[in-house]
Image (cartoon, grey):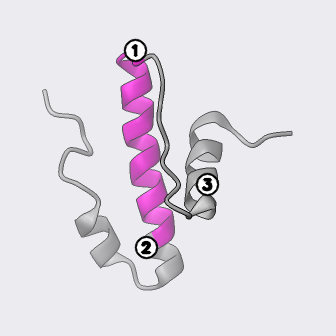
């Protein structure tokens, strides 16, 4: 069985009408992928920021919730 998000995020980003929608769709895609990996029992989830702290933070908040 293939994971739901195996197609990639390219089509989602192409459907976005604004850069903010593209960002949100990309983060949601990666969050679903991360949640699937966690459900499969991976021991850790590496996140490479590549100088893009905003996207890394959005991803981690979506997967693990906001820091209080």
> Mark 1 and mark 3 in contact (Cβ < 8 Å)?
no
Badge 2 density bin: few <14, some 14–19, many ≥20, Cα 10 Å = some
> Mark 2 vs mark 3: which is more N-terminal?
2
The image shows residue 40, relative to residue 13, as above or below, that is: above
Q: Residue furthest bottom?
A: 18
Count of numbered circles in the view: 3
Residue 54 lies in the magenta-colored region: no
Q: Residue furthest right?
A: 68
Res 52 → quadrant: bottom right
Specify the principal SS of the magenta part: helix
Helix, strand or loop for disc 2: helix
Q: Where are the magenta residues, as a range?
A: 23-42
Question: Which numbered circle lies on residue 41?
Answer: 1
Res 51 → quadrant: bottom right
> Mark 3 and mark 2 in contact (Cβ < 8 Å)?
no
Q: Position of residue 68 (x, y in %)?
A: 86, 39
Question: Which numbered circle lies on residue 58?
Answer: 3
Q: CA distance from mark 2 to mark 3?
A: 13 Å
Residue at x-position 64% and y-position 52%: 57
* 65, 52: nearer the viewer: 52
Q: CA distance from mark 3 to mark 1?
A: 22 Å
Q: Which residue is mark 2?
A: 22
Helix, strand or loop for disc 1: loop
Residue at x-position 20% and y-position 44%: 6
Q: Is residue 25 left or right of residue 62?
A: left
Q: Position of residue 54 (x, y in %)?
A: 63, 62
Helix, strand or loop for disc 3: helix
Badge 3 density bin: few <14, some 14–19, many ≥20, Cα 10 Å = some
Q: Position of residue 34 (x, y in %)?
A: 43, 36
Residue at x-position 74% and y-position 43%: 66
> Mark 1 and mark 2 in contact (Cβ < 8 Å)?
no
> Mark 2 vs mark 1: which is more N-terminal?
2
């Amino acid at each position: 069985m293939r994971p739901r998000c195996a197609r990639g995020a390219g089509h989602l980003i192409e459907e976005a009408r604004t850069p903010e929608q593209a960002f949100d769709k990309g983060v949601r895609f990666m969050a679903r992928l991360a949640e699937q990996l966690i459900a499969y029992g991976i021991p850790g989830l590496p996140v490479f920021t590549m100088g893009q702290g905003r996207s890394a933070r959005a991803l981690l908040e979506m997967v693990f919730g906001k820091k209080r």
